[in-house]
Image (cartoon, helix red, strand yellow):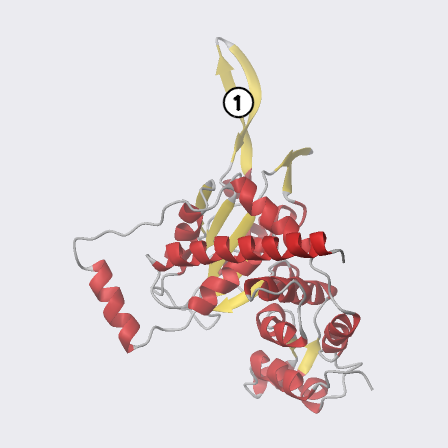
Amino acid sequence: MAKSEEKETREDVVRFRKKITTLREEVGKVIVGNQGVVDGVIICMLAGSHALLEGVPGLGKTLLVKTMADAMSLAFSRIQFTPDMMPADILGTTVISDDGGKRDLVFRRGPIFANIVLADEINRATPKTQSALLEAMQEQRITVAKETYQLDKPFFVLATQNPLESEGTYPLPEAQLDRFFFKLHVPFPGREELHQILSRTTGTDNDKATSVLTKEEILQLQSLVREVPVAHHVQDYIVRLLQATHPQTSTFDVVKRFVKFGSSPRGAQAIMLGAKITALLDGRFAPSIEDVQKTALPALRHRVLLNFEGEAEGVVTDTVISTVLKSLPTTAK
């Protein structure tokens, strides 16, 4: 790499970190704690993909998504999923329009036409309605009555779901889960965080994030992520990690015994892009194996499916993945 190119690369990384640091600080004005969850959502957006946030009601998942939209001056829409919701409530529908006595069929766009779509409590809707998001999440377009409509870029679906043990929930289909870049667990706040939440929300102050990133800047940051090179040994580690989640090719007893299906190739794609972004956030233009290990858990926990024995034994997917990460050699033998 020429000195001029190296200097330009360093400047790009510095600008990247500065913009994301500003975004983090702006979101922190509203959201208390949960920095890991905030960073996870930011990584998903920089990768041009979607995030699934799981936690009990009242932990600020919806507020986080709305705050992210405010901080990035993006078109925002919220869809509250309920058991009686239909796909047309999300995508839109064709209606009869009467214009001066002339009747015509007109497509009325649904809430999916936005830059950030909050799918709130997505697992309270039936699988038929959940599937309305599939084409939008994968192709960034929708098809209604044989007509295809392109969605504006950037486009993110940030979905929240209640734990599956909650009453009145429908598990997301595997194909739907696979479209989410990360699955992030939103923990219950600690004692000090609860004090901050009470102080912020029960007084007269009403903090709100202001815009610090434009649509064009977001697209530029996404483009920079794609330019980050990955060393062969790091990519090979990702490939071996993915293979280790499949009981047919894994050498780990915990996988062979408790896993039904390993991760799809989308899991490897998510790990690699996540590692690239993690490196950029740390001021580096090349990811390391440590970056891969940091992003593997949220990228794989919803893509590794347990078998009946694993579910009966109360095995947690995170435990399986963590076991593989601890024991998988960093270099191929």
The answer to whether 132 appears left or right of 119 in the picture is right
Q: Is residue 299 above or below residue 118?
A: below
Which picture quadrant has residue 38?
bottom left
Q: Is residue 109 above or below residue 205?
A: above
For residue 198, say whether it is visible. yes
Mark 1 is on which residue type? Ile
Give the crowd class for mark 1: few <14, some 14-19, many >=20 residues within 10 Å: few
Residue 111: where, in percent of width, then height?
49, 40
The answer to whether 135 appears left or right of 331 in the picture is left
- Quadrant occupied by the N terminus: bottom right
Q: Pointer 1: what residue?
A: 96
Which picture quadrant has residue 274?
bottom right
Q: Is residue 285 above or below residue 96?
A: below
Which residue reaches farthest right? 333
Helix, strand, or loop for circle 1? strand
- Quadrant occupied by the C terminus: bottom right
